Image (cartoon, rainbow, N blue to C red):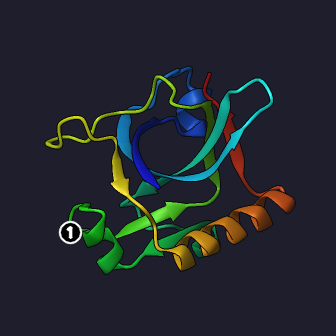
């Protein structure tokens, strides 16, 4: 699922920010219910910024961006920066112009599978950062 979320980049956190500077679409990578009933969630941000390292991102096809009702620009899922939080969390945001909606929709299964596999591979290699947000 792709949600609207106030994503906090590691460089923003390093500069002392506690909130993301921009609300953005983010893909839920993991949502796991713990024994205490909490749902721990990990999200990957979607950005317009073309990656310097193509292995650290996954471009969304234009057809997927249209289905999610994102703008007409190119979009990349970032694989090297993740946020972790307890669902639903205080950084979940309403989509502008879509009263009461917080989710853009679902990623197609092949894109989600590629996202998950690449994130797992990057984590195993120690090539991603994950910020705890709560």
Figure quadrant of residue 6: top left
Residue at 52% from the left image edge and 20% from the top image edge: 18
Q: Closer to the camera, 83 or 69?
A: 69
Instruction: Give the residue displayed 33% in from the left and 54% down from the top.
Output: 104
In the depicted structure, whether residue 47 falls above or below residue 12: below
Q: Quadrant of residue 35?
A: top right
Choose top left, top right, bottom left or bottom right for residue 118. Answer: bottom right
Closer to the camera in the image, 126 or 37: 37
Residue 109 x/y as whole percent: 54, 74
Secondary structure of the residue carrying tag 1 is: loop
Q: How many marks?
A: 1
Q: Is residue 26 left or right of residue 122?
A: left
Residue at horizontal 24 percent and vertical 35 percent from the top: 100
Q: Position of residue 39 (x, y in %)?
A: 65, 34
Instruction: From this view, report whether residue 80 is shown above or below residue 102.
Output: below
- Quadrant position of the C terminus in the picture: top right
Q: Residue furthest left?
A: 97
Q: Is residue 110 left or right of residue 103?
A: right
Question: Which x, y percent locates residue 115?
Answer: 61, 68
Would residue 32 be found to the left or right of residue 126 on screen?
A: left
Image point (67%, 65%), residue name: 116
Looking at the picture, does residue 76 appear above or below residue 29? below
Q: Position of residue 12 (x, y in %)?
A: 52, 32
Near mark 1 (Cα within 10 A), the count class, few <14, some 14-19 or many ≥20, is few
Q: Which residue is mark 1?
A: 72
Pick the residue in front: 45 or 104. 104
């Amino acid at each position: 699922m792709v949600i609207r979320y106030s994503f906090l980049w590691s460089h923003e956190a390093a500069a002392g920010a506690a909130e993301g500077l921009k609300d953005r679409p983010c893909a839920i990578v993991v949502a796991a219910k713990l024994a205490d009933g909490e749902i721990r969630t990990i999200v990957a941000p979607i950005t317009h910024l073309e990656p310097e390292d193509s292995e650290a991102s996954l471009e969304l096809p234009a057809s997927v961006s249209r289905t999610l009702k994102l703008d007409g620009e190119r979009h990349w899922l970032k694989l090297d920066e993740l946020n972790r939080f307890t669902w639903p969390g205080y950084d979940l945001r309403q989509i502008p112009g879509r009263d009461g909606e917080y989710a853009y929709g679902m990623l197609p299964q092949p894109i989600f599978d590629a996202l998950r596999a690449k994130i797992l591979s990057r984590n195993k290699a120690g090539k991603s950062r994950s910020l705890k947000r709560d």
